[in-house]
Every structure is written in structure tokens, then in C-alpha cells.
Image (cartoon, rainbow, N blue to C red):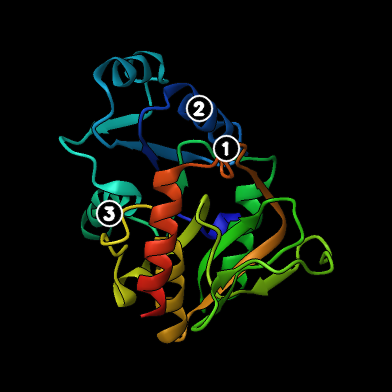
Amino acid sequence: MLSKLDFPIPVFICHWNNPSDCLRTVQCFLKQKMLLQVSIIDNASEFDKFQFLRENLPSEVELIRLKENRGYGGGLNVLLNRWLKHGKGDFCFISAHDALPQDGCLEMLIESVLKDEKIGIACPEYGVAHIPCFSPIRGPFLPYVTPRPLGTVEQVAFPHGTMMLLRRQCLEQIGIFDERFFAYGEEIDIGLRAWKYGWKVVVVWGAIVVNPKRSVPSVIASYLQLRNALLLIR
């Protein structure tokens, strides 16, 4: 199936003030059994942290520094806009700077979307048996379910935000990230928009990404999550 692709496949990583984590993420991507072109957008990190990242990145990895922090979706939009206007290929991966895709993760995602041209967004699982759901009253939630067999492609309300695969034709129709969210919730919004236009949003069971720090409490994170949930419901 992978022979149908035009290589390399772009990988867009959004970074802010965590160079050590970002370097681990880059290495995890480069260890995948696929030819990838990795680009990092830096959201105006502190200069010493940006410098550490720049000095330790493999030479083939592109690093772009923004003059201001545009948030997760806003930072990724810089790379997505460039890809949509000037890049090649039908697919790209996007990732947080602390995502650790496990062996075979990217290959499983690509194989899944190649089998179904209506899949616009595909994401891995976290190794935890829950699925993304959305209610206009309750907002986004993650109920636990019976684990599915490996390789199962299951439709969900929105993708996990840590890492996902995006299809060019889907983005051309629904648009890229809504920058009003800044952080938390933009993946829910883009998933709901994909559904609205008839695209499938799926999680691929057995394709696993590890995100050790995604549950770290923060007053700012709690505020953004609540504010953005209300924006989504509205």
C-alpha cells in the first residue's frame, strides 16, 4: 500500500519551550519505517531553549522560529498553509512537541487512509481504551470502551490532538485550524468541521502514541479547556 505514496511525507511539529522533549519526538519520528520530511515551527520560545533545540537537531530537520506565540493551531497553520499552497502529496502528519509515536504507528495510519478515500483525519490511540465523543450539552468527553482488535479503524467525533494524519483534500474543503482556540480544543473543532462536510474522522487501534505530559495540571490549561469547550458548544 505504501508504494502508492509520493515520498517523503511531511511531518509538522509545533514546539514551545521544551527542546529536550521535542528532540525525543523528532527521534521517534525518524525511527519510523517511512521516509519523512520533518519541519518544526517554534512558537517564540525563550532564546536559550530555541538555541538548544537548533544546535541539537539533525541537519535534515527544518526549524522555523516565529516572532510571537501563535498557539498550537496557529503555529501549525504556518506550515499547513505553506504545504497546501506549495507542497506535494496528499497527506501530512502533525504533532505536539512531546508526542512519542511507537513502532509502526505512522505506517498503520497511512495504510488505513489509503484504504478509504473518505477518511479526512486519522489519529492513533493512547494505549487506553477510550474514544473521543462530543455532545452539544456535555461538550467533549472520552468514555471508556471495550478494547477493539488491533488494526480496527473506528469513526470518532474528533481526533486526539497529540498527533494526527491530515488529508489534503479534506483541509482544502474544511479549512485549517481555528486560531481562536490558541491551545486545547482546536482538534475537536477541526474534527467536527470534517464531519459536517462528510469526511470520516477515525482512530486506528494498535497505532499508539505516548504523550507522557498530557495530563499535567495547570491553571492556564484549565482556563483554556473550559473557555474553549464553551466556544465549541456555542
Precedes in sequence: disc 2 or disc 1: 2
Precedes in sequence: disc 2 or disc 3: 2
Q: Tell us which disc is closer to us: 3 or 1.
A: 1
Instruction: Quickly name the residue at label 2.
Output: 21
Name the outermost residue toward the front.
Answer: 219
Whole-percent x, y for residue 136 in the image: 49, 83
Q: What SS does tag 1 mark?
A: loop
Instruction: Quickly name the residue at label 1.
Output: 213
Crowd tier of the residue under label 1, counting other residues whose Cα lies within 10 Å: few below 14, some 14–19, many 20 or above: few
Is any atom of residue 79 visible in this view?
A: yes
Q: Is residue 216 above or below residue 231?
A: above
Q: Is residue 151 left or right of residue 33?
A: right
The quadrant holding residue 155 is bottom right
Q: Residue at x 29, y 14 (%)?
A: 48
Alpha-carbon distance for marks 2 and 3?
A: 21 Å
Whole-percent x, y for residue 128 in the image: 75, 54
Q: What SS does tag 3 mark?
A: helix
Q: Residue at x 35, y 80 (%)?
A: 234
Instruction: Quickly name the residue at label 3.
Output: 77
User: Foreground: 136 or 191?
Assistant: 136
Crowd tier of the residue under label 3, counting other residues whose Cα lies within 10 Å: few below 14, some 14–19, many 20 or above: many
